[in-house]
Image (tube, coloured by chain):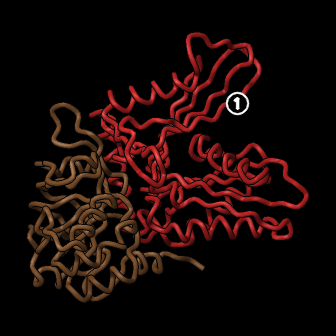
């Protein structure tokens, strides 16, 4: 029961992103950034006041995660996805600035889906609760902004074959809706 | 819990669903062998204390002792600190305190402490409604199903659904939480409630939401219902959702 998995390495280009389709299994490689609501709020405040962001978002992926503390000798603690809907208010702005991918869990708002179609970005789901397993794919971790936010700080991660599934593609497809329809009975 | 997931793995029709459950089982293995959290959200420390009325506690306040335990557990155990001290100002307390403590006085000279850390993702998808008694069992079922459908992929299905029926507004919510403490899949001792649990589980698993909401049969692993007498004018129903990381530990002193 293995499905073909597509290996992707960041930064992502429009060409690569446009070919992705809902339901595809993807293994992410390279640099990705972490961010939750508190960090997103700060990024938007910077944009609102015309200042520069602490990270360059062009072609990048943000992983919605607040890891648990690393045990001595480990690179990172457990690091599974958090609910993406809390970032919906901020995501379209970042997508318009060149953000190409988001990793999280749960549905996105129509505004985010629209921004993904318009600016060619995708939304991936990682398995919520598979946090110990996912942490094995993280090879480097450093805080690059907002250390005062603790687990909510922006971390720069280097990942190797982080397993995700395409949920929203650039055509407006939504795997949550399609998948549920297939298995609903009555 | 692992047994329930294994059964779901065997019976899940969706290939994606099967793959997800397999990841969850593998994740549980890694968490166990490496002593790391299975989910980074190590929750709000919800602590149920059944205090024997003949027990006399010396040397300080029980509440302080529990919070000190939470502080040490979350710090020394490398668990995530997920609590902010003020719901609007939102500054992290840094040690995951305070706990939410439910204290019950019982006969005897023992003290039972149950720790049930609760993640935010599934807690956020919970709900409560004051139904009219005329809405009856159908109204209860509809509210439970509507809550699970609205939650969709957010609470990390497969979920455990805790339901409270009856009591007052706050009692009903507490019943729903207490229902989650039951070992996964243990039916209610009341036959009519056990039947309702089975019917609701079937209906929830016919929604198609499936593991992680990506489609499949196993949206929930169990429905647990607790009930309480109720006012002639009321029919409160509360739904407390727990993700598949149903972490509970009980100790008797």
Where residue A17 appears, as percent x and y from the top left, is 16, 80
Q: Could you tell me if residue B2 is visible in this image?
A: no
Vertical order, A126 against A122 (above or below): above
- Shown colour of chain A: brown
Vertical order, A134 against B215 (above or below): above
**How many numbered badges does the structure rendering display?**
1
Where residue B43 appears, as percent x and y from the top left, is 44, 44
Q: List the residue tagged with mark 1.
A: B104
Q: Tell me: A33 left or right of A173.
A: left
Q: Tell me: B14 left or right of B33.
A: right
Q: Residue at x 31, y 47 (%)?
A: B26
Closer to the camera, B139 or B190? Answer: B139
How many residues crowd around disc 1 within 10 Å: few (fewer than 14), some, or many (20 or more)?
Answer: few
State which quadrant residue B134 falls in.
Answer: bottom right
Closer to the camera, B219 or B108? Answer: B108
- Shown colour of chain B: red
Disc 1 chain ID = B
The C terminus of chain A appears in which quarter of the rendering? bottom right
Q: Residue at x 19, y 31 (%)?
A: A72
Q: Tell me: A51 left or right of A40.
A: left
Where residue B220 appears, as percent x and y from the top left, is 53, 59
Q: Residue at x 67, y 23 (%)?
A: B51
Q: Residue at x 66, y 54 (%)?
A: B163
Where residue A39 appears, as percent x and y from the top left, is 27, 59
Closer to the camera, B189 or B68? Answer: B68
Q: Could you tell me if residue B227 is visible in this image?
A: yes
């Amino acid at each position: 029961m293995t499905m073909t998995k597509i290996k992707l390495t960041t930064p992502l280009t429009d060409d690569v992103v446009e070919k992705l389709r809902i339901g595809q299994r993807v293994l992410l490689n390279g640099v990705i950034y972490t961010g939750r609501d508190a960090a997103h709020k700060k990024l938007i405040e910077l944009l609102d006041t015309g200042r520069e962001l602490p990270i360059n978002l062009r072609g990048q992926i943000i992983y919605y995660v607040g890891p648990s503390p690393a045990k001595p000798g480990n690179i990172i603690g457990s690091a599974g996805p958090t609910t993406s809907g809390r970032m919906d208010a901020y995501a379209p702005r970042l997508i318009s600035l060149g953000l190409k991918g988001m990793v999280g869990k749960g549905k996105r708002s129509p505004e985010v889906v629209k921004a993904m179609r318009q600016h060619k970005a995708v939304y991936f789901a990682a398995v919520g609760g598979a946090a110990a397993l996912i942490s094995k794919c993280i090879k480097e971790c450093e805080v690059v902004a907002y250390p005062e936010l603790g687990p909510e700080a922006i971390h720069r991660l280097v990942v190797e074959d982080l397993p995700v599934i395409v949920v929203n593609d650039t055509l407006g497809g939504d795997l949550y809706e399609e998948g549920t329809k297939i298995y609903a009975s009555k | 819990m692992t047994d329930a997931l294994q059964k779901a793995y065997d019976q899940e029709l969706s290939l994606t669903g099967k793959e997800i459950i397999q990841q969850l089982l593998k994740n549980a293995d890694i968490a166990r062998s490496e002593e790391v959290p299975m989910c980074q959200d190590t929750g709000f420390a919800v602590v149920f204390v059944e205090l024997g009325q003949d027990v006399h506690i010396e040397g300080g306040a029980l509440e302080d002792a529990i919070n000190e335990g939470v502080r040490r557990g979350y710090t020394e155990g490398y668990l995530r600190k997920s609590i902010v001290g003020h719901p609007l100002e939102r500054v992290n307390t840094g040690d995951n305190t305070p706990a939410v403590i439910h204290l019950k006085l019982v006969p005897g000279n023992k003290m039972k402490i149950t720790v049930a850390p609760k993640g935010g993702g599934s807690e956020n998808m919970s709900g409560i409604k004051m139904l009219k008694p005329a809405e009856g069992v159908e109204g209860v079922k509809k509210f439970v199903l509507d809550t699970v459908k609205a939650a969709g992929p957010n609470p990390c299905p497969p979920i455990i659904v805790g339901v409270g029926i009856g009591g007052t507004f706050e009692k009903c919510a507490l019943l729903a939480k207490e229902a989650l403490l039951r070992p996964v899949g243990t039916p209610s001792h009341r036959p009519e409630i056990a039947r309702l649990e089975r019917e609701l589980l079937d209906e929830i698993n016919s929604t198609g939401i499936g593991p992680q909401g990506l489609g499949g049969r196993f949206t929930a692993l169990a429905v647990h219902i607790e009930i309480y007498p109720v006012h002639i004018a009321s029919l409160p129903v509360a739904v407390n959702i727990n993700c598949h990381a149903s972490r509970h530990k009980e100790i008797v002193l």
